[in-house]
Image (spheres, rainbow, N blue to C red):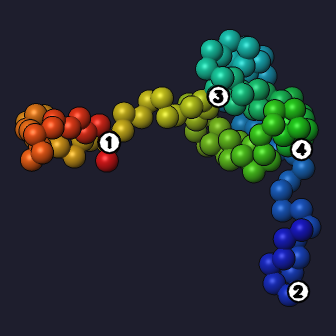
Amino acid sequence: MIEISDRQIIKNPMPKRITIESHLSLEELLTRYRQASDPVERSHYQIIWLLASGKSPKEVAQVTGYSRQWIYELVWGYNRIGPESLGDGRRNNQGAEPLLNDTQQALPSKSGVKMNIAWV
């Protein structure tokens, strides 16, 4: 139960059923779930497949161990972007540009010890 104000109380702010956009067929979701080699991607496809199969968010949360809030976040991305939103996006993140260029990194430090600065 969430209290919004003194007069308005929402007992269940999350819907019991979720609509999944038909970016992929139920069969294609199942195939991608079973063939995914990345564990995060596999879990994401499992969640979308279970919801598209008619399972409730509560049931999917119990089966997968993900919170209902995270399931709603996952569905939000899938419905708006499609399958590209699924999986671990961190693996494609190259990180920020180094603060020092190659020349600056090659310069000796004042202490005479070369420091390898990979992160700040």
* Disc 4/disc 3 C-alpha distance (Å): 20 Å
- Image mark for residue 40: 3
Of callouts 2 and 4, the N-terminal one? 2
Q: CA distance from mark 2 to mark 4?
A: 28 Å
The answer, for residue 24, to whether it is visible in the render is: no
Q: Are marks 2 and 4 in contact (CB under 8 Å)?
A: no
Amino acid on which disc 1 is placed: Trp
Mark 3 and 2 residues: CB-CB less than 8 Å, in contact? no
User: Which mark lies nearer to you, 2 or 4?
Assistant: 4
Asked if residue 40 is positioned above or below residue 60 in the image, the reply reads above
Q: Residue at x 86, y 87 (%)?
A: 6
SS label for mark 1 = loop
Residue matched to label 2: 7
Q: Nearer the viewer, mark 1 or mark 4?
A: 1
Q: Nearer the viewer, mark 3 or mark 2?
A: 3
Query: Which residue bears the numbered disc 1?
Result: 119
Q: Residue drawn at (20%, 38%), measured in percent from left and top?
A: 115
- Of mark 3 and mark 1, the one earlier in the sequence is 3
Task: Check whether the beta carbons of the residues at disc 4 and disc 3 lie within 8 A of each other.
Answer: no
Place residue 4 in its image quadrant.
Answer: bottom right
| Residue name at image x 48 percent, y 29 percent | 91
**Amino acid at circle 4:** Lys
Q: Which amino acid lies under the numbered mark 2 shown in the image of this protein?
A: Arg
Residue carrying label 4: 58
**Which residue type does callout 3 highlight?**
Val
Label 3 to label 1: alpha-carbon separation = 26 Å
Numbered label attached to residue 57: none
Q: Nearer the viewer, mark 3 or mark 1?
A: 1
* Upstream in sequence: badge 1 or badge 4: 4
In the image, residue 80 above or below residue 23 = below
First along the sequence among labels 3 and 2? 2
